[in-house]
């Protein structure tokens, strides 16, 4: 067989992931806060992009509450500007005369951000304990031991320290450690620097005023029985009545098992909805959250400069490149808004009964149902619904919340979220002295024509953070 080289012309189709296409795909999956960061970065890097200033008059399409597809076209319209001659600029004195941050008039700072928006200084547990150490009488080598102890207290207030390793590194004696640890355990918050839960509760019981000797004896002599909930065994061992044990157990239950939580430096993360759904009459209106998002446009200055004879070829090439990027970004943002709107409208169409009647009427829904309805690919719907929240008359929910697997409910099917809500209601209304087991929950759901396995109930219970029946049983 002879080998030879030939040229063949063949026509094929393939998807090329250009940088512009990758940018458009990324914009789809960004939520509101991430979009703010992206647009701020683009405004810094692309000089052809500029936001519509707040002092410019709005057009007829700029009225508040834009909630239809036609009004979203406003995002790519070029606003009208005055025909001022902007080429007679003295560039040498540009920053002094035309700089955006320069103003010869003293501002009254009325537009300054509110004080509550500035970061505040927070005192964490380490700083709080260190301040008390400075004010204490612990000095010399004892202070070195105290700093080692404070530095190894975790966020819950417990001592997480390898004693043998610390003795080798700092060269102190174990009885000195115990003495200094006892002084640290008298610091605020009460119960801090404990090595386990028993010691933490015991420190707090000893600090009670008036003292409770029964609670102290329970923790010192019968802690394992008390931990297992065997109050009758605790009563027999301490030779006390069951009522006295229950009264002391009530006192112990009010103690703080994690004393360091009150100084936790973790901040609450608030959800910013990307979409608002409001009911107007008998219809649900979708409004996209555009608060803080700048409405972008192409700078008319660079458009004029592009056609200026004084503009060099290098400058024109740069302007054309940046203009293509700016136009693609604006179109991608426009397409993102349209896609989010269409997906939300489709969800309302499928889940109308949920919005009208509540969670018990949530229907099973998959991404393919919405994708077929709006004639888009499933991956597009998945990107749109990822990490985005919607403010509805039923509360703020994640868009993924509306997509549920189906569970047999008589002749029809019911959404898994509705089943979880059934289980939650049953647990909340149960007798705390005799909580329902997973098998009893299965039987109760079967009487409501909801047929699921016991392991499914256990899985849903764990997802919702509901402990098993043995842990839900109220001992006193």
Image: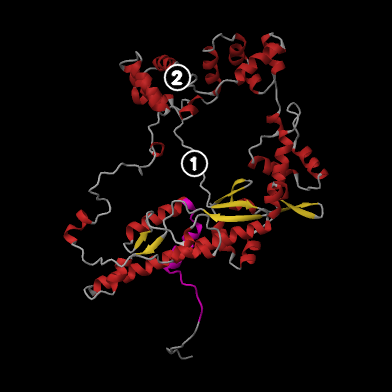
Q: Which residue is mark 2?
A: 188
* Count of numbered labels shown in the rendering: 2
Task: Judge left or right: residue 1 versus residue 347.
Answer: left
Residue 466 screen position, x and y as percent: 66, 36
Task: Judge left or right: residue 472 versus residue 387.
Answer: right
Quadrant assignment, res 445: top right
- Are dots 1 and 2 in contact, CB under 8 Å? no
| Quadrant (top left, top right, bottom left, bottom right) of the C terminus | top right
> Going 48% across and 55% down the picture, which residue do you hit?
30
Q: Which residue is mark 1?
A: 269
Query: Tell me, what colour scheme is on the image?
Result: secondary structure
Task: Answer yes or no: is residue 442 visible.
Answer: yes
Residue 343 screen position, x and y as percent: 59, 60
User: Which of labels 1 and 2 is toward the front?
Assistant: 1
> Going 55% across and 14% down the picture, which residue do you hit?
205
Residue 473 screen position, x and y as percent: 71, 28
| Residue bounds of the magenta highlight | 12-32
**Category of crowding for the residue at label 2, using alpha-carbon neighbours closer than 10 angstroms: few (below 14), some (14–19), many (at least 20):** some
> Going 68% across and 40% down the picture, which residue do you hit?
461
Extreme residue in the left direction: 92
Task: Answer yes or no: is residue 22 visible.
Answer: no
Quadrant assignment, res 317: bottom left
């Amino acid at each position: 067989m002879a080998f030879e080289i030939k040229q063949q012309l063949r026509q094929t189709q393939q998807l090329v992931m250009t940088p512009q296409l990758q940018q458009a795909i990324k914009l789809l999956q960004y939520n509101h806060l991430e979009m703010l960061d992206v647009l701020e970065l683009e405004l810094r890097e692309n000089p052809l992009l500029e936001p519509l200033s707040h002092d410019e008059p709005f057009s007829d399409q700029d009225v508040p509450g834009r909630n239809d597809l036609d009004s979203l076209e406003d995002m790519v319209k070029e606003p009208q500007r005055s025909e001022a001659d902007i080429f007679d600029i003295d560039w040498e004195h540009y920053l002094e005369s035309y700089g955006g941050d320069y103003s010869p008039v003293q501002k009254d700072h009325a537009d300054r951000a509110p004080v509550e928006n500035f970061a505040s200084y927070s005192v964490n547990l380490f700083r709080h304990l260190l301040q008390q150490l400075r004010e204490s009488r612990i000095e010399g080598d004892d202070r070195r031991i105290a700093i080692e102890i404070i530095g190894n207290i975790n966020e819950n207030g417990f001592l997480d320290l390898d004693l043998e390793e610390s003795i080798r590194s700092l060269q102190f004696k174990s009885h000195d450690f115990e003495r200094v640890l006892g002084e640290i355990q008298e610091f605020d918050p009460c119960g801090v620097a404990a090595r386990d839960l028993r010691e933490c509760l015991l420190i707090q019981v000893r600090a009670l005023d008036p003292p409770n000797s029964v609670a102290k004896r329970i923790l010192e002599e019968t802690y394992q029985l008390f931990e297992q909930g065997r109050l009758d065994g605790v009563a027999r061992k301490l030779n006390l009545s069951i009522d006295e044990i229950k009264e002391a157990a009530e006192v112990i239950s009010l103690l703080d098992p994690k004393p360091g939580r009150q100084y936790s430096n973790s901040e609450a993360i608030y959800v910013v909805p990307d979409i608002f759904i409001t009911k107007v009459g008998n219809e649900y209106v979708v409004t996209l959250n555009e608060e803080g998002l700048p409405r972008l446009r192409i700078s008319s200055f660079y458009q004029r400069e592009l056609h200026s004879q004084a503009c060099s070829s290098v400058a024109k090439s740069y302007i054309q490149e940046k203009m293509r990027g700016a136009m693609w970004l604006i179109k991608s943002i426009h397409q993102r808004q349209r896609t989010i709107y269409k997906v939300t409208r489709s969800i309302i169409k499928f889940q109308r009964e949920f919005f009208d009647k509540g969670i018990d009427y949530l229907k099973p829904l998959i991404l393919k149902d919405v994708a077929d309805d709006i004639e888009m690919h499933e991956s597009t719907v998945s990107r749109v619904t990822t990490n985005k929240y919607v403010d509805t008359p039923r509360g703020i929910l994640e868009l993924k919340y509306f997509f549920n697997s189906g569970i047999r409910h008589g002749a029809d099917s019911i959404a898994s979220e509705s089943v979880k809500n059934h289980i939650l209601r049953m647990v909340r209304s149960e007798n705390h002295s005799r909580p329902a087991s997973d098998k009893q929950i299965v039987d109760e759901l079967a009487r409501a024509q909801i047929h699921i396995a016991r392991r499914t109930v256990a899985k849903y219970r764990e997802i919702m953070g509901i402990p098993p029946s043995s842990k839900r049983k109220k001992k006193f």
